[in-house]
Image (cartoon, rainbow, N blue to C red):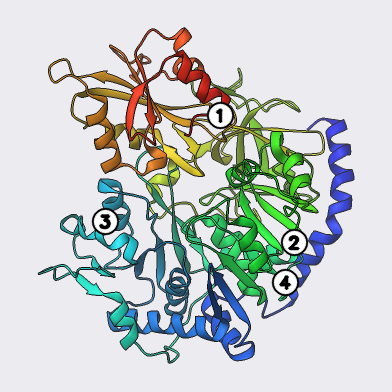
């Protein structure tokens, strides 16, 4: 860091340090500040039983009722032989039951594996198997999808809700009936330490199927309490996070701070831009936990004189792009926006505590040396090293891959993935000095002189679309088995006016069988969640590869889906027609103008 940067960073640190020191002292001096969710759940039921803990659409759940639901799930799991340390798969849409099942795992010392309910086919079977669980708690919306795979799930018991109970399936049990029979009495709570594993949260990473990342009770408790103090959250607040709870964001930034404070947490089964203002008024929301795409969706709704008719005082989230930041804040009259950056499996936590427009935040004062930006060669797809063999640190304003130091002295430990082999792929050694160790984030960021970071783009074999990370190798693996397909190369392309990158697949047809776009669409829909299905396809004779047979995708990404510069046939997945249609210049103009639904 140059001298001028050190000066600006010191000035900013000086203004931030008192507040963060107060938070640190409060957490270290209060013996009750850090407790597991199971203990907090029990104590809230005794001390504030009638206060509203959860609001889901038209439902309102008190702390006492929530605790009773947690106990029902815990006693059901105990009866099925679940012990401390055992994994339990939870596959549900956002609902009080989701959080009750999660709370039950906390009380028993079990590990809740939070399953993405949008997954299908082999990807869904994989995530259920790799947790090691022998029992799955599943809601009605997901039961049928899981039952269809029961032959691939080994000994997994499916406790779900089927409209038509499956005949002769010995591994299915009716969850609703079991819960009605389960006791609401407090189960015997084993000794559960803050260092024990609490949850598995799946992340796409950069390659392969989703991987379970480790979340310990300490991270849930300390992170939740610290964020509550950073947000100045009180029991009178209501935090609203209408994004999936199986992701870390809604769970750890929305639910955890609110519940640990004794405040209310609100959500819904699926985000709705048209219902947003009705929700925040009905629930008396004061804190909105967002992902950037939600804000863009809200900006596309018809402006109204009632847009500011709400009580939101803080919007905190990730991925709010600079092009809509100010307009969003002014239209909806939100006093403060706190954008952030972090990774479920990582040891990075940036907070834009002062609301600097466009920034994803900065590290805590005195810890800036734990983060480095290293030069990345996008054409070669690798970090650059100098003549001394060390990585090259970026200058101020220069984009580079964000690296976070892994050491015993780091304030945020690196727990990584449940499978240690997956961690090795995320780490890099001998970076800036011999034998040092850093975590690779897989993201390009830049930094200003005051040590504020700004997101630039994702790198590697993944991209983000519709609020979800898409691992291209996983998608390629599933699409390569489609009828009439010899090979695929999947990548993300920019679409004007849309956040992230839309999926595009270059298809090399099977010369014998031939390629049919509609058959391909059926295969993609059967094996991939909607956000991972290619929006565009390009038909070509071959895929350009490197010397070690890795796909060269930079040129494909640059060319995108513009037919004026591409001779290969192009197709667009028309959601309303339910089929792929030829992509000509007229259709391209509609997509770019934002008049064609994506």
Looking at the image, can residue 234 be seen? Answer: yes
Residue under pointer 3: 145
Q: Pick the residue in front: 382 or 172.
A: 172
Q: Pick the residue in front: 90 or 561.
A: 561
Q: Secondary structure at mark 1?
A: loop
Looking at the image, can residue 222 be seen? Answer: no
The image's mark for residue 222 is: none
Q: Give the image location of residue 343, x and y in percent.
A: 55, 48
Q: Give the image location of residue 229, x and y in percent.
A: 74, 66
Q: Quadrant of residue 461?
A: top left
Alpha-carbon distance for marks 2 and 1? 38 Å
Alpha-carbon distance for marks 1 and 4? 51 Å
Which residue is painted at 26% across and 56% down in the image? 145
Q: Disc 2 vs disc 1: Cβ atoms closer than 8 Å?
A: no
Please determine whether, in this image, residue 161 is positioned above or below residue 398: below
Q: Disc 2 vs disc 3: Cβ atoms closer than 8 Å?
A: no
For the residue carrying disc 2, how many other residues have a C-alpha within 10 Å: few (<14), some (14-19), or many (20+)?
some
Q: Quadrant of residue 98?
A: bottom left
Alpha-carbon distance for marks 2 and 3? 40 Å
Q: Nearer the viewer, mark 2 or mark 1?
A: 1
Residue under pointer 2: 230
Determine whether, in the image, residue 255 is placed left or right of residue 340: left
> As drawn, which residue projects farthest toward the left?
168
Q: Secondary structure at mark 4?
A: helix
Q: Nearer the viewer, mark 1 or mark 3?
A: 1
Q: Disc 4 vs disc 2: Cβ atoms closer than 8 Å?
A: no
Which residue is painted at 33% across and 27% down in the image? 580
Which residue is painted at 48% across and 19% down in the image? 588
Q: Give the image location of residue 295, x and y in percent.
A: 64, 45
Quadrant where the image shows the N terminus? top right
Q: Pick the residue in front: 318 or 207.
A: 318
């Amino acid at each position: 860091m140059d001298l001028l940067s050190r000066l600006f960073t010191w000035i900013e640190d000086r203004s931030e340090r008192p507040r963060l020191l107060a938070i640190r002292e409060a957490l270290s001096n209060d013996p009750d500040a850090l407790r597991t969710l199971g203990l907090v759940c029990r104590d809230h039921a005794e001390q504030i039983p009638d206060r509203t803990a959860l609001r889901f659409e038209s439902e309102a759940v008190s702390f006492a009722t929530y605790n009773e639901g947690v106990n029902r799930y815990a006693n059901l799991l105990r009866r099925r032989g679940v012990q401390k340390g055992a994994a339990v798969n939870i596959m549900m849409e956002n609902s009080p039951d989701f959080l009750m099942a999660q709370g039950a795992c906390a009380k028993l010392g079990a590990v809740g594996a939070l399953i993405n309910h949008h997954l299908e086919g082999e990807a869904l079977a994989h995530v259920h198997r790799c947790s090691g669980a022998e029992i799955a708690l599943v809601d009605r919306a997901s039961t049928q999808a899981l039952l269809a795979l029961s032959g691939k799930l080994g000994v997994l018991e499916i406790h779900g809700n089927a409209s038509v109970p499956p005949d002769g399936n010995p591994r299915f049990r009716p969850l609703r009936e079991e819960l009605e029979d389960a006791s609401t009495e407090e189960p015997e709570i084993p000794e559960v330490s803050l260092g024990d594993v609490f949850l598995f949260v799946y992340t796409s990473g950069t390659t392969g199927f989703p991987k379970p990342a480790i979340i310990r009770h300490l991270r849930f408790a300390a992170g939740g309490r610290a964020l509550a103090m950073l947000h100045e959250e009180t029991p009178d607040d209501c935090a609203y996070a209408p994004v999936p709870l199986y992701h870390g964001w809604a769970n750890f930034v929305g639910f955890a701070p609110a519940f640990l404070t004794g405040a209310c947490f609100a959500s819904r089964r699926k985000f709705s831009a048209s219902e947003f203002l009705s929700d925040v008024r009905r629930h008396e929301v004061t804190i909105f936990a967002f992902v950037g795409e939600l804000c863009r969706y809200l900006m596309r709704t018809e402006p109204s004189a009632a847009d500011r008719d709400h009580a939101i005082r803080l919007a905190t989230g990730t991925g709010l792009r600079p092009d809509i930041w100010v307009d969003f804040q002014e239209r909806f009259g939100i006093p403060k926006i706190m954008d952030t950056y972090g990774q479920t499996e990582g040891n990075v936590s940036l907070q834009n505590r002062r609301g600097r427009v466009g920034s994803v935040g900065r590290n805590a004062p005195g810890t800036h040396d734990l983060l480095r930006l290293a030069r990345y060669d996008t054409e070669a797809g690798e970090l650059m090293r100098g003549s001394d063999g060390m990585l090259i640190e970026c200058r101020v304003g220069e984009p580079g891959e964000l690296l976070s130091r892994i050491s015993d002295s780091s304030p945020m430990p690196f727990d990584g993935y449940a499978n240690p082999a997956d961690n090795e792929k995320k780490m890099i050694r001998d970076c800036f000095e011999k034998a040092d160790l850093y975590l690779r984030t897989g993201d390009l960021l830049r930094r200003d002189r005051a040590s504020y970071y700004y997101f630039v783009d994702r790198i590697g074999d993944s991209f983000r679309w519709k609020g979800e990370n898409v691992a291209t190798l996983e998608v390629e693996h599933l699409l390569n088995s489609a009828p009439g397909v010899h090979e695929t190369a999947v990548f993300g392309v920019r679409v004007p006016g849309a956040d992230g990158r839309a999926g595009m697949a270059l298809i090399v047809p099977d010369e014998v069988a031939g390629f049919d776009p509609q058959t391909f669409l059926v295969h993609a829909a059967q094996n991939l969640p909607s956000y991972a299905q290619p929006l565009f396809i390009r038909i070509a004779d071959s895929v350009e590869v490197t010397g070690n047979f890795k796909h060269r995708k930079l040129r494909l990404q640059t060319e995108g889906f513009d037919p004026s510069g591409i001779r290969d046939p192009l197709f667009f997945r028309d959601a309303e027609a339910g089929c792929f249609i030829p992509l000509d210049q007229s259709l391209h103009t509609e997509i770019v103008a934002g008049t064609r639904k994506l």
